[in-house]
Amino acid sequence: MKLKLFIPFIFLSLSLFSVDKPNIVWVVSEDNSASWLKLYSKTGVEMPAIEKLAKNGLVFNNAFSCAPVCSVARSTIISGCYGPRVGTQYHRNQQYAKMPDGLKLFPYYLKQVGYYTSNCHKEDYNYNPKEKEGVWDESSRKASYKKRKPGQPFFHVQNFTTTHESSLHFQDMKKKTTDNPADMRVFKYHPDTETFRYTYAYYRDRHRLVDQQISKFLKGLEKDDLLDDTFIFYYGDHGGVLPRGKGYAYNNGLQVPMVVYVPKNWQHLSPASRGSRVDGFVQFVDLAPTVLELAGLKSDLGFDGKAFLGKEVKLDELNKRNTSYGYADRFDEKYDMVRTVRKGDFHYMRNYQRFNYDGLYNRYRYRMLAYKEWQKMFDEGKLTKEQSQFFEERPVECLYDLSNDPDEVNNLAKDPQYSAIVKEMRGLLTGQVKDLADLSFIPEPIMIREGVENFVEYGQKNKQRIAKLSQISDLSLRAFPEIKKDLTATLNSSDALERYWGLIVCSNFGNQAIGLYDKAKKMLENDSDLFVKTRALEFLALNNQIVPGNYIKNLIEMAKDENDLGLILNTVVLLRDGKHKYKFDLNYLLTEKRWSGLSLKSPTGRRLEYLIGYTGKTK
C-alpha cells in the first residue's frame, strides 16, 4: 500500500515522499509462560493457530517479560522503558508515573506518520492517563483496525483474557477436562495432588480455547486480504499462572512465548527466513523500538530496548544477544524486591528482602484452590524440601542452571564450581541497578509523600544516594564478620534510608547479627523515622528478641496515610503467618475513623480485610 506523507524529518529513516508501510498487529494472551506451548516444550499444548503463524514467521526461543505481572509488564511494553527507572514497577501504582522528558508512549510516533492505532481492549498502564493523549485512535472493547481510512496503515493490539489467572478461580473440580489430570507432569516445586493435576489440565484447556479465539481473529485478517502486508506478533503478556508463576520472578514468570508472522511483501525486514527459530534474547523493552523500525521510523529516541526486526537487524548480531533483566516489587498488598539476570541458560536472582518469603499471603493469589491446598500442606508438614521452599526464607542470591533444572529448585549460588558465574551475574545486576537509578531502593510511601511527579528526574537527582543504598544492601552478600563494622556505622547514619537498609541487611543475616540487637532495640524505641522503626521491629521479632504486638499500635499511630499503614501491615502478616506465629490484636482499627474509608481494591484495604475482617467501602 502507498501513502504520501509530509512529516517532520526526525521520524523518517526512509524517503520523505512516498513510503510503503506494513501493518502491524499484536495478538496478546494473558498469563502464559513459554513452557505451556508445544512450540516450546514436548509436554506443551498444541495451539494450531499459533503454530500456523510460526510456519510463516519466526519463533523466538528466548523472549522475556521484564516483570511477571500485568500492569508492570504492560507499562514496560507501551513505553519501552524499564519500570524501576521510570516508576512503574509496582502492581498497581499508588501514584501514576510520567514518561521521561522528550519521550512518548510509542504508538504516538506511529500516528504522526499516518498510522491508525487501535487497542482492543486492555491497557493496564501505570502511567498518568494524560500520557495517552495522541496515542490511540481508539482504545476500547470495540476497537478495531477496520475503522481506519481506506488504504491507511494500522497498528492494532488484540487482547485475549481467556488464560488470565482469574480463569483458575474455580471453586470445585467438576468440569471435565480434555486431558486426564492423572497424566499431568507436575513441576518439582508443586505437590503432586489431585488439585494440582486438575488445575494443570484445566489451564491447558484455557490454552486451547484462546487458540480457537485467536484463529477466528486471524481468519478475519485473511478475509480482509491483509496477510501479505501485516506483521503479526503473538506473545503472552508475562508468564504464569499456576502457583509460583505469575507474580514471581522465576523463569516461569518471565519467559513468554513469542511468534512473529512475517508477511510475504515485507520479508526483507526479517533477519531470518520464514519458518525459522531465533535464539537471541528479546525483552519487552525491545517491542517499542522494533515496531518503529518496522514502520520505517527512528527507534533511538530514548527507549531502554533495542529493535529485533527491521532492515538494520542482522541475524548474527541478534543471536549474540543472550541477556535479559527482570524485576518484581509490590504486587497488590504483598511487598517484595527481587531483581534478576538471565544469561544463556543461567538465571540469577537477588532477593533483597530474603525474609519476605514467596508464599506470603496475597488475596488474589490465594483465591486459587491450588494455592490454598499448598499452604495447608505446608502447615501440616506434608511437603518435600523442594515443595516447602515457597513458604520459607529465601537465599539472598540464587543461581539456577535451566538446562538441568528447569523448575529452579536447586540453588547453585554457594557451589564453588559456579563461583565465577555468580560473580559475573552479580556484577551485571549491580551495574543494571546503578545505571537505572533503581527507584525501589527508596520506599514507595516516601516518594508519594514527597509528591514526586517525575520519577525519572527524581531518580537521577538521587542517583548517588541510590547507589549508596545499593552498596549497603550488597553487604548481605558477604560474610558477617567482614561487614559488621560497616553495618554498625550504617545503623548510626544520619540518613534514615541508610539506617532502613542497614536493618534489612540485619534481618537478612538473622541471628548472625546478634551483636546488633541492643542497637536495634534503641532504634525501635527512639528513632524518629517510622520505616526505620518498622524494620527494627522486624529484625528483632524475626529473631525472637521482642513480642512485636506490644509495639505495632505505636507504629500504626505514626502512620500518616494508608501507604504507610500498608507497609507496616506487610510486616504484621509476615510475623503472624511466618514460622513465628506471633499474635496481634488489631480489631481496634475497625473503629478508627481515618481507616474506615479504605477501599478493598487498595493494598492496605486488602491487608485489613485479611487481618481483621475489614469490609471497607468500595470506591
Image: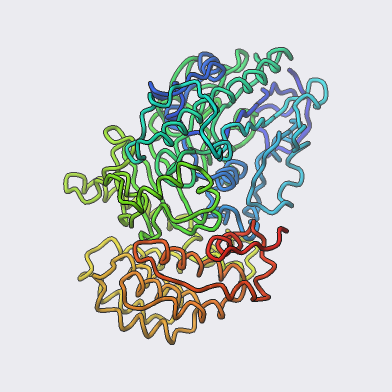
Q: Residue at x 43, y 58 (%)?
A: 434
596 or 475: nearer the viewer: 596
Q: What residue appears at the point 21 percent right and 49 percent down from the top-left corner?
A: 419
State whether residue 449 is above or below residue 517.
above
Say which residue appears at 54% left-offset and 76% top-offset: 556
Q: Position of residue 255 (x, y in %)?
A: 44, 36
Q: Report whether 177 appears left or right of 407.
A: right
Depth order, front residue of 19/194: 194
x and y percentages locating residue 605 in the rendered image: 61, 62
Q: Quadrant of residue 345?
A: top left
Q: Is residue 35 left or right of residue 137?
A: left
Q: Quadrant of the C terminus?
A: bottom right
**x, y percent for residue 403:** 29, 32
Quarter-wise, where is residue 566 in the image? bottom right
The quadrant where residue 510 appears: bottom left
Residue 375 percent location from the top left of the image: 41, 50
Residue nearest the observer in this picture, 218 or 483: 218
Whether residue 256 sits left or right of residue 488 in the image: it is right
Would residue 502 be visible to someone looking at this image?
no
Total labels drawn:
0
